[in-house]
Image: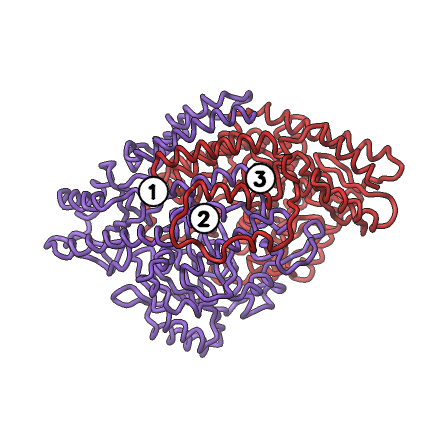
Chain colours: A red, B purple
Amino acid sequence: MSPTEFRQFGHEVVDWIADYLAHPERYPVLPPCRPGDLTDELPASGPEQGEPMAAILKDFRDQIVPRNTQWNHPGFMAYFSITASGPGILGEMLAAALNPNGMVWKTSPAVVELEQVTLDWLRQWLGLPDKQFGIIFDTASVSSMHAIAAARERAAPEVRTEGGGQGLILYTSDQAHSSIEKGAIALGLGKNAVRLIGTDADFRMRTDLLTAAIDRDLAAGLRPFCVCATVGTTSTTSIDPVPAIADIAERYGLWLHVDAAYAGSAAIVPEFRHLLAGCERADSLTTNPHKWLFTPVDVSVLYTRHPEMLRRAFSLEREYLQTAADPRAMNYMDYGVPLGRRFRALKLWFVMRYYGHQGLAAIIRQQIGWAQELAAQIDAHPRFERMAPAPLSMVCFRLRGPDEPNKKLLEKINASGEFFLSNTVLRGKYSIRLAIGNMGTTRAHVQRAWQIIQESV
Amino acid sequence: MSPTEFRQFGHEVVDWIADYLAHPERYPVLPPCRPGDLTDELPASGPEQGEPMAAILKDFRDQIVPRNTQWNHPGFMAYFSITASGPGILGEMLAAALNPNGMVWKTSPAVVELEQVTLDWLRQWLGLPDKQFGIIFDTASVSSMHAIAAARERAAPEVRTEGGGQGLILYTSDQAHSSIEKGAIALGLGKNAVRLIGTDADFRMRTDLLTAAIDRDLAAGLRPFCVCATVGTTSTTSIDPVPAIADIAERYGLWLHVDAAYAGSAAIVPEFRHLLAGCERADSLTTNPHKWLFTPVDVSVLYTRHPEMLRRAFSLEREYLQTAADPRAMNYMDYGVPLGRRFRALKLWFVMRYYGHQGLAAIIRQQIGWAQELAAQIDAHPRFERMAPAPLSMVCFRLRGPDEPNKKLLEKINASGEFFLSNTVLRGKYSIRLAIGNMGTTRAHVQRAWQIIQESV
């Protein structure tokens, strides 16, 4: 494609994006299609001859967009509601154009150093201590897997060479994200190596049960090595008592990893900085700017105070990648599984600069406020019950009584095309989750959702 | 950022990209900067207040671009030379704007089904048999790690629960990419579980040594479970004898994984389809459209005939992600470590449609031709020696004699700003690699590189 043609279609694409972002609610939030609809409509084979860009863009508009779940729709309140933002999209455009691969410093000083700089800026905004090493992975699942690998490297360095690691035990709560268990399985520690510690009435890890489990495992001759606390669980956004868990980790010599994938961003708001209390003592922490910092997927950040453990776990040298040693020329490829590295820091830099610390904090603060207003309204309603504390931007609730009307309620709302909520099970009861995090969502949208919820029962 | 402001700056960014792509050689291919230069120039902290987009774009142009290694420069002939293409960049722009997360079907039918459709198109172009399951990861390192995990799941399903897996042995050649070893280490199999099988004079895995190693391990009571063959090694683009390795894998019941990260794309050229001979019998294969199919990083494809092994290895259910069962509603999150999934298939779909099968094949065919012309020229030159066969688009060579003049030669060329070549060590000798794969590279650029090489000695 010639630069001239790129220019022509680039402008067309920008106009389409601007129109789309102005009115994402033009499309139903959940696409009214059945599994296989798109597949059946697309050709069974790719074209032998090239096709005009205009035709491809037409099919994008006619076939792809209507089958997309519109995460930009202001009524997208499922899972963790996330959106990109204009500056993030611009950053991604430029990253795709430069298309560098920052595996080592030499393959793009800009990729490597901007990753270091933006992650240090973010560290400061989060109130984390100095001397944190930051690295970007695609998802929090992958970040956490690397954290557990670093923990393993510290506790049982022989595993790198000899494999195994049986008897190494990892602790996390029964509300932790499945990625912790998945990470342990991938790393060959096994599902049985994961202790899902019970939680209190507010879905926070019970430290008495944690201590008891560690003692039991030690008595059985096992090797506790890691505890993963969660700041903002997926089901309820509950916050584990990290300071107390840090005490326990210290006492027993465990690696403390904190999964703050969603909630970490909220700590840039001064009055919510306490969310990360105790995390200054964590050995590693992950947070996802693509979740609540308005940066396009994917960008998950892993911080650690012990980069040498990541490096010991993952560094392998090959002739074709050897470069001159310079302490300031960091080779990120030595700190994880992926060799290739997109220029993911660019979009984050754009977002941080365009909005600034206070601008981003203001948006998050507002979203938390709307959730708390909704929580109070639910509490005041005789037919609804709230199922968990709502410390952040997500509210879990249900109609009092059996599950079935709740399932019907959720189906009805989600079928409307105007809102998309998700569900979970809390204390054995089917519950509805309403998550706010979309940059296009306003207080009016949240209130409209609440109105429709009330009218739909 | 309002849609109006996005429109304004989106157009500015598109114009900048079009100008940049028209003349990437305006910048030296390797940036003339020292480690820390960019870091020192950027503020030590992020801005408290937001900044104008115009200022951010100015800094991008003035500070970031000149510190970037220009992978788009037609003289970028290091590593595997890769470039994006216009349609790929347009696809990435739209993916960033829609910003969906295709973790399950419901979270974006378009993301899930377009991934299935494009990967099936690509499978057909590669001449791979039906019934392949395809999934996109960020890098080949991650794809291969998943392949090895699936192999482990088949051979030793108890590891998922109990951990360990000591005694499981994986075979690959001493020319294989480091990611195979890294994958084994990450998975807890350990470095000692990897046998680096010796290679022949053409850097291809020796099947006699492979068989001998397996027999030796079996006799020692170990458990051979996987062999990783490479089609297009990183050092020399050598091609392991996959049909013979497939015979051995079959005889011993090993999982055969093929790393065709770079060279796989060449198999879309009819006269190079033989590159993947035997791969129809592989249990899994990875190839990276971001390497030689002109798609922006990152998109690495893993094919497998046994998706149930990936699923058994990685599926974990959580209430908040349960969705109605429908065999056509695939949940990719069950097939690997990452939960979140960018809309990576979109850019690949754009590239495949815009160029078509024949268009892409023509570009790859041409690039291979230029490399082979160069190889012949090097062979005909009295002072140079070629160090490996050049079956594809990369040539390994050196000045006859000691290493030092070769190191000086490479330094001189790379300091010119006009070309960037890389190096490796072959049969104990420092060798220079010249890789062609950049869409902006022409025959004239390759010939000019050869001229400069000759003049620089």
Look at label 2 and name its amino acid: Leu
Q: Quick check: B404 left or right of A274?
A: left
Look at label 1 and name its amino acid: Ala
**Which residue position holds label 3?**
A288
**Which residue position holds label 2?**
B348
User: Which residue does the image show at 21% across and 54% down from the upper left?
Assistant: B397
Q: Mark 1 lies on which chain?
A: A
The percent position of residue A212, horizontal first and vertical second, equals: 74, 53
In which quarter of the view is residue A240 placed? top right
Same subunit, tags 2 and 3: no
SS class of the residue under badge 3?
A: loop
> In the rendering, which numbered label is found on residue A325?
1
Q: Which of marks 3 and 1 is in front?
A: 3
Q: Which of marks 1 and 2 is in front?
A: 2
The quadrant of the picture occupied by the N terminus of chain A is top left
SS class of the residue under badge 2?
A: helix
